[in-house]
């Protein structure tokens, strides 16, 4: 299956088969984008692509399999990619109730929710620069906080999926600032947002429901990805299409420390 068609503006959505990710992908397809869903599950991917094509009439929708908790899988994805990329939406997230590790020995929620965002941007930034002006949207959350730079993988603290999730979303908001500073000169805009309170597998795993539909949850990420109103805005955090001050980006030293720690995970693997 081809990954993208250079005649369309191209968008990629991680976690594209989930409640919010599928809605984001469908709305982008409705706006005429070529859309690629990134997912670990082939059957869900096939069904999601079929549903989106049927709903939008846009046949420039496909998928690629990738395990976002593993750098080697993301690198393999990058090697398979052909054509342009204008929009990258980092949306995938997990909330395992027990502490688990990747085959590389990294705590799974940190690997997926934080390093997955970091590695996707690092691996695809050359393409986003080539086709700039381009945009990166990091789907975060207003439920963020508790980041401990000395215990990012919950090796010292008792693990809870809620605490690990909140930490990962704070990290995503901080990395948004770090990447925005680095990529602004290349005309790549990087912003983060809270998608809304959507009833999803992720929210249910955290013990919550949600009063918004997936399409409502997708509105802010899609707006950030496509609206002319924010074409020159970078390094910011949004809720309900409104810019909200993010205190986690104010401590530049802590932001830079997190960025360097994330960089070391690749360095230590000799990649």
Image: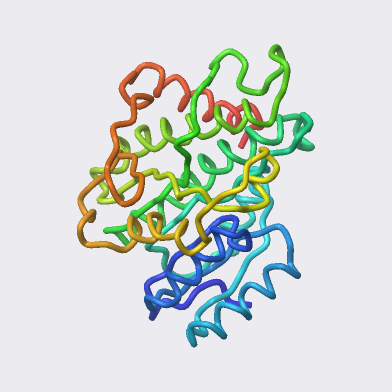
- Placement of 30 over or under 42, stated as above or below: below
Residue 87, percent from left and from top: 40, 60
Residue beneath the point at 25% across and 51% down: 187
- Placement of 94 over or under 58, stated as above or below: above
Q: Relative to 251, is 95 on the left or the right? A: right
Residue beneath the point at 30% across and 49% down: 189
Residue 199, percent from left and from top: 60, 53
Q: How many marks?
A: 0
Residue beneath the point at 49% across and 71% down: 35
Quarter-of-image position of residue 208: top right
Q: Nearer the viewer, residue 200 or 170?
A: 200
Q: Relative to 229, is 197 on the left or the right? A: right
Q: Relative to 150, is 160 on the left or the right? A: right
From this viewpoint, which residue is outermost toward the front?
Answer: 211
Q: Nearer the viewer, residue 243 or 204?
A: 204
Residue 103, percent from left and from top: 79, 37
Quadrant location, the N terminus? bottom right
Residue beneath the point at 40% across and 23% down: 255
């Amino acid at each position: 299956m081809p990954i993208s068609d250079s005649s369309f503006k191209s968008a990629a959505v991680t976690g594209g088969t989930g409640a919010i990710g599928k809605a984001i992908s469908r709305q982008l397809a409705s706006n005429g984008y070529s859309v690629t869903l990134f997912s670990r599950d082939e059957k869900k991917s096939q069904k999601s692509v079929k549903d989106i094509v049927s709903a939008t009439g846009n046949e420039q929708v496909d998928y690629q399999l990738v395990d976002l908790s593993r750098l080697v899988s993301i690198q393999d994805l990058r090697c398979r990619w052909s054509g342009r990329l204008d929009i990258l939406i980092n949306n995938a997230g997990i909330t395992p109730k027990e502490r688990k590790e990747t085959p590389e020995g990294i705590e799974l929620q940190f690997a997926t929710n934080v390093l997955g965002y970091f590695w996707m941007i690092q691996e695809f930034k050359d393409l986003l620069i080539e086709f700039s002006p381009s945009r990166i949207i990091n789907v975060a959350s207003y439920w963020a906080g508790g980041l401990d730079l000395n215990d990012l993988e919950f090796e010292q603290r008792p693990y809870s999926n809620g605490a690990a999730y909140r930490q990962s979303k704070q990290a995503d908001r901080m990395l948004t600032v770090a990447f925005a500073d680095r990529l602004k000169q290349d005309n790549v805009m990087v912003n983060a947002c809270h998608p809304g309170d959507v009833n999803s597998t992720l929210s249910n795993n955290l013990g919550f429901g949600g009063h918004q539909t997936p399409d409502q949850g997708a509105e802010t990420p899609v707006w950030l990805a496509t609206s002319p109103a924010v074409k020159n805005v970078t390094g910011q955090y949004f809720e309900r299409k409104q810019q909200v001050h993010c205190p986690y980006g104010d401590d530049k030293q802590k932001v830079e420390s997190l960025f360097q720690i994330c960089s070391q995970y690749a360095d230590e693997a000799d990649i």
